[in-house]
Image: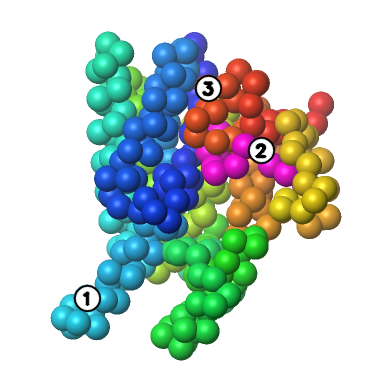
Amino acid sequence: MKKLVIVALGGNSLIRDKEHLTINDQYCEIQKTVNHIVDIIEAGYKVVVTHGNGPQVGFILARSEIAYKYEKLHFVPLLNCVADTQGAIGFQIQLALNNELKKRNLKQKAVTIVTQVKVAKNDYAFKNPEKPIGNFYTHKEIDEVKKKHPDWIMISDAGRGYRRVVPSPKPLEIIELDMVKNLMANGHIVITVGGGGIPVVQDDNGYFKGIDAVIDKDFASALLATNLGAEMLVISTSVDKVCLNFGKKDETPLSQITYNQAKEYIKQGHFALGSMLPKIDAILFYLKNGGQKAIITKPEDLKKAIIGKAGTHIKIDK
């Protein structure tokens, strides 16, 4: 039986740099990444794809503000931004995947599911927003941003600049999970829980409604991997490997660590809240709940990482 790999693509890893921010630029990066995903499929693995949306949500919110300022058009709620990016980014991944599969004479088809994810109404995160979204701002820009958006909560993000933070409740249930399973059973490559999923809460009568928040993409991917019994969770990001003392003179890349070592490194403060810490937390959840192995790597190293030649590999202690 083919092993199942969940490939979680970071929203930032779909953007090359500040000079390449257009939709076409993003599609070019997706095409490159998709080549490596199809390499994994061609090597005999089953794949489910998830993706981030932090910068892309920021773009939509910025457009919404400009449209309101000049044309008095309505603002786009945060949860709708998540839904919009699920469709837009999912479409590009689906398009690129199907084209690459056809090029290699592979019969599978990719399909995107606009996915809702249940969260708790009383989640701690709604009173303590910590999830970074949108653009990075420099130290020089931060005062102007605060004047323009006095209601925004801004944090310094891993030395890369300042970003807005919003509530990030824990994912409890993937509403469309059975649909994902059905599509997989029919041989399809599913793109799901984009941006962590659209957050919804359930009332006492069982009805759902959307709520403004951003679910961490990596944690939602870990929940998906757990629910599907995936043998491997691969988180694709913009760095080669997880590092101790990141950005310092004694920066040390890690090739292999265990569950307990990762927990100890968290205690020592090695992983930043806005970058690596959520990824490690998600992986620890996955491993604790039956996962076999997780990898953090760059998109172009996906195939090499799968066979143990790149990235940081994290396993449960024996």
When the figure is inspected, residue 123 is found, relative to residue 258, above or below; the finding is below
Q: Secondary structure at mark 2?
A: loop
Chain-order first, disc 1 or disc 3:
1
Residue drawn 73% across the image and 51% down it: 246
Q: Quadrant of residue 257?
A: top right
Crowd band around label 3 with a 10 angstrom C-alpha radius: few (<14), some (14–19), many (20+): many
What is the tally of numbered marks visible in this picture? 3
When the figure is inspected, residue 206 is found, relative to residue 43, above or below; the finding is below
Q: Residue 203: in sight, yes or no?
A: no
Task: Name which residue type carries label 1.
Answer: Ala
Q: Which mark is residue 303?
A: 3
Whole-angstrom CA distance, mark 2 to mark 1, is 40 Å
Q: Which mark is residue 67?
A: 1
Whole-angstrom CA distance, mark 2 to mark 3, is 15 Å
Magenta-tinted stretch? 234-244
Q: Secondary structure at mark 3?
A: helix
Task: Name which residue type carries label 3.
Answer: Lys
Q: Quadrant of residue 222?
A: top right
Q: Position of residue 152 (x, y in %)?
A: 48, 79
Q: Position of residue 304 (x, y in %)?
A: 57, 21
214 left or right, relative to 65: right
Q: Which mark is residue 132?
A: none
Task: Name which residue type carries label 2.
Answer: Lys
Crowd band around label 1 with a 10 angstrom C-alpha radius: few (<14), some (14–19), many (20+): some
Residue under label 2, please give it: 241
Whole-angstrom CA distance, mark 1 to mark 3, is 42 Å
